[in-house]
Amino acid sequence: MSWRGRLSLPQILTLGFLTIILVGTVLLSLPVSSKDGTATSYINAFFTATSATCVTGMTVVNTALHWSIFGKIVILILVEIGGLGFMTFAVLMFIFMRRKVDLTTQLLTQQSLNLETFANTRSVVFLVVRLSLAIQLLGAILLFVDFYPRYGLKRGLGYSIFHSISAFCNAGFDLFDNSLVRFQNDPYILFVLTCLIISGSLGFLVWKDILLYHKDHFLSLHTKLALTTYLGLIVISFAVYLLTEGNFGENTHLNVFQRLMNTYFMSVTPRTAGFYTYPYTKISMGGMFFTMILMLIGGTPGSTAGGIKTTTVGILLIRVWATLRGKRDATFMGRRFTNDNISRSLTLVFLVFVVLSIATLVLTITETVPKHFGIEYIIFDVVSAFGTTGLTLGLTPHLTIIGKLIFAVLMFMGRVGVFTVMYSLLTSKRPEDAFRYPKENVMIG
């Protein structure tokens, strides 16, 4: 029996991501990857490779100042692989080598991209790659329009490509000193970047439905729920940040429209992207708490985003609303969610809270919290790591070795998926129970 026969699909998927991270760690630890020509410590290289592959954007060294051109290219490649899913590249290799894509690879791709069936794996992979490259190329061109006058041809082109890929893959890596604070007064850049971020975090299946709508005149329940939840969150986020941050009214050097664009940018980026135009250490406590909620939610399944996902939140909200109204079924747009859907959503949320609670508890012991901060200093970064967002209140650059390892695990689970990691660790198969016990109710609430 081959190694693929002995491993379950979640285990192969998990090991695949780990392999990419380890290769990236070796490359980033080489002297050629740093600007000063010295070797980077393995723990810092490992943290950066994990952050890039899991499209998080958390850093323990300054991306612009520490890494050489080679190191930055390695980071971009890891971001691209992590954003699209390494199985997408595996299928492409089979296709380019004119080899038939075997059943295991199709099943892995199905799980990696959250496909309902693997019958159209090849066509979906081609769509994912073509769409992704087209959006990133268009994004780079639009960014170059602004970056060229600022930085010239060479740097402008490099910045355009780097930030287009980083934004579309929701990675949050940037080549500036303090993210995008210098672009507070540039609504054009902010709008282009938010378009890239939304494009990447909507999910490839949603884009597939949208692009084929003119032919099929049909949107799946997944797409309807994802779009409704995603757009609803943007509107709610915009309203909340207007309230908690006062539309950044204290920034008198910005006009009203520029402040509105910064508020809109803030309503899009916290869920997965990690860019910011206003330091999160300066926002209100209400804004900080709401940001943690957004980071925990994340983007859409099958996208470049992390978190518990918008559809999970949507299903649970609909189920709660149905229960409060005394209804038996959770329905949305003429369709009923299955009990398995609801059960998996509840299990996922519970597991996430357990994982985040354990991580926070350990970090309160291993890390040092500045006097002017409370427990939010740790919780904010923990949620950011799991949501693959990359925002920080200042903890991440000062993590201990134990802290870096914990954050690496959080980023990995946030990107690969809690269920995938748990299945790969706890069992090689998912057998059905041979029998069922008698059922009985207990008191709730």
Image: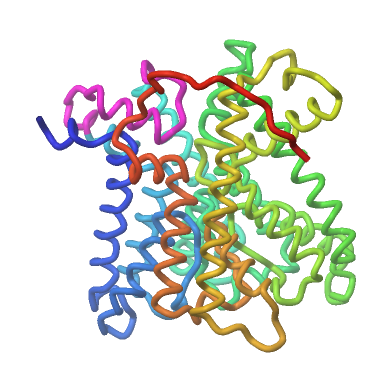
The quarter of the image holding the N terminus is: top left
Percent coordinates x, y for residue 189 in the rendering:
66, 59
Percent coordinates x, y for residue 5 in the rendering:
18, 30
Q: Is residue 126 above or below residue 427?
A: above
Q: Nearer the viewer, residue 439 or 91?
A: 439
The quarter of the image holding the C terminus is: top right
Q: In the picture provided, is 234 more to the left or to the right than 427?
A: right
Q: In the picture provided, is 418 more to the left or to the right than 10?
A: right
Residue most toward the bottom? 371
Instruction: State the image quarter where residue 310 is shown.
Output: top right
Q: Residue at x 46, y 60 (%)?
A: 162
Q: Residue at x 25, y 27 (%)?
A: 104
Q: Residue at x 43, y 33 (%)?
A: 113
Q: In the picture provided, is 250 more to the left or to the right than 22?
A: right
Percent coordinates x, y for residue 418 in the rendering:
47, 45
Q: Residue at x 86, y 25 (%)?
A: 325
Q: Is residue 132 above or below residue 125?
A: below
Start-end of magenta stretch: 94-120
Q: Is residue 210 above or below residue 214?
A: below
Instruction: State the image quarter where residue 257 is shown.
Output: bottom right
Percent coordinates x, y for residue 263 in the rendering:
79, 59
**Does residue 108 belong to the magenta stretch?**
yes
**Does residue 182 belong to the magenta stretch?**
no
